[in-house]
Image: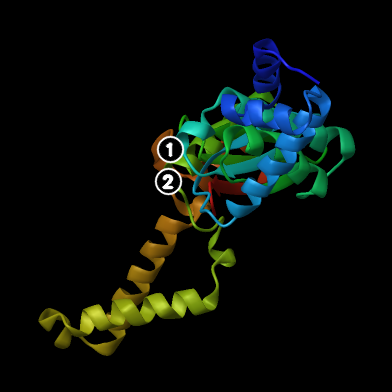
Amino acid sequence: MAFTASDIKNLREMTGAGMMECKKALTECNGNIDEAVKYLKEKGLAAAAKRADRATAEGRLFMRQEGNKIYVVEMTCETDFVANNADFVALGEKMIDVTIAKGYTKVEEEHNKMLEDLKVSIRENMNVAKVEVIEVPADSTGAFYIHSDKKTGAVVVVKGSAADAVKTFAYDCCLHIAAFTPSYTSKKDVPQSYIDEQKEIFKAQMDQDEKMASKPENVKEGILQGKVNKHLAEICFEDQMFVKDDKKTVTAKLAEVGKEVGASLSFATAKLYVLGK
């Protein structure tokens, strides 16, 4: 079956393959467009399999709130150029659509299959690295934020009230987390092994300080504990100074907002998302 230059153009638009590849596919398939599409997909997917071990250090986060759930999808790719590609962005939004429609709570085979056609046309390794769903309980407020780089984001759920002031506070907490990237929500979340390790580091530093040598042991122990407490306050979200009021900790601001709305507030979720982590 003969084919024309218009057939080559159409096949190229349908598949995103190169002109010479489209011409070869039509030749191999005797001008049959449908067979040529299948041929290119098979060849393209074979090539994608060879690219599967390439690092996918770029990509972007997608978040959306629907009802009492916040959905998070993380898609990775090889280059920042592709991460900003309109088709890549559209696919990420479609991933959330499917997640909501199917009630998915983690990466499923359907998510991975949705990547196949884009892998063929763009010729770059891609992955669905994360799919998560965060519940917002009744009488609670949920918020999310994605930084302009699309690689850093946060989700916060405040229990106790759905008042407007709490909604504003929850969103500001998302900004705080994205800006200060705390390692833990509160001190109780910090593993004892980590605290012990930090103590050893600070103790070694103090032992090298000649001014410390003459101090009584109980004084040195107090100084050591002070260093540990200061460090924990720097890495724990609830103990950090609030991004919108550096005179108050996040915990103090939480209490202030609770008093304003007449409710006892607490954090159900305070999570940082960083691409690749």
Q: Residue furthest front?
A: 2
In the image, residue 188 sits, relative to residue 107, either above or below, namely below
Element at label 1: loop
Q: CA distance from mark 2 to mark 1?
A: 8 Å
Element at label 2: helix
| Residue 138 picture quarter | top right
Amino acid at dot 2: Phe
In the image, residue 54 sits, relative to residue 246, either above or below, namely below
Rendering coords of residue 59 (x, y %): 54, 40
Whether residue 14 is visible to the viewer of this picture, yes or no, is yes
Q: Residue at x 80, y 38 (%)?
A: 99
Rendering coords of residue 247 (x, y %): 38, 41
Amino acid at dot 1: Val
Q: Could you say which is closer to the camera, residue 14 or residue 186? A: 14
Determine which residue is flagged by label 2: 180
Rendering coords of residue 131 (x, y %): 71, 46
Q: Could you say which is closer to the camera, residue 188 or residue 133? A: 133
Determine which residue is flagged by label 1: 243
Whether residue 97 is visible to the viewer of this picture, yes or no, is no
- Numbered label attached to residue 176: none
- Mark 1 is surrounded, within 10 Å at the Cα level, by few (under 14), some (14 to 19) or many (20 or more) other residues, namely some
Q: Are marks 2 and 1 in contact (CB under 8 Å)?
A: yes
Relative to 44, 53 lies left or right: left
| Residue 223 picture quarter | bottom left
Q: Residue at x 60, y 48 (%)?
A: 271
The image quadrant where one finds the C terminus is bottom right
Q: Residue furthest left?
A: 210
In the image, residue 200 sits, relative to residue 66, either above or below, namely below
Task: Select label 2 or label 1 by which is in front.
Answer: 2
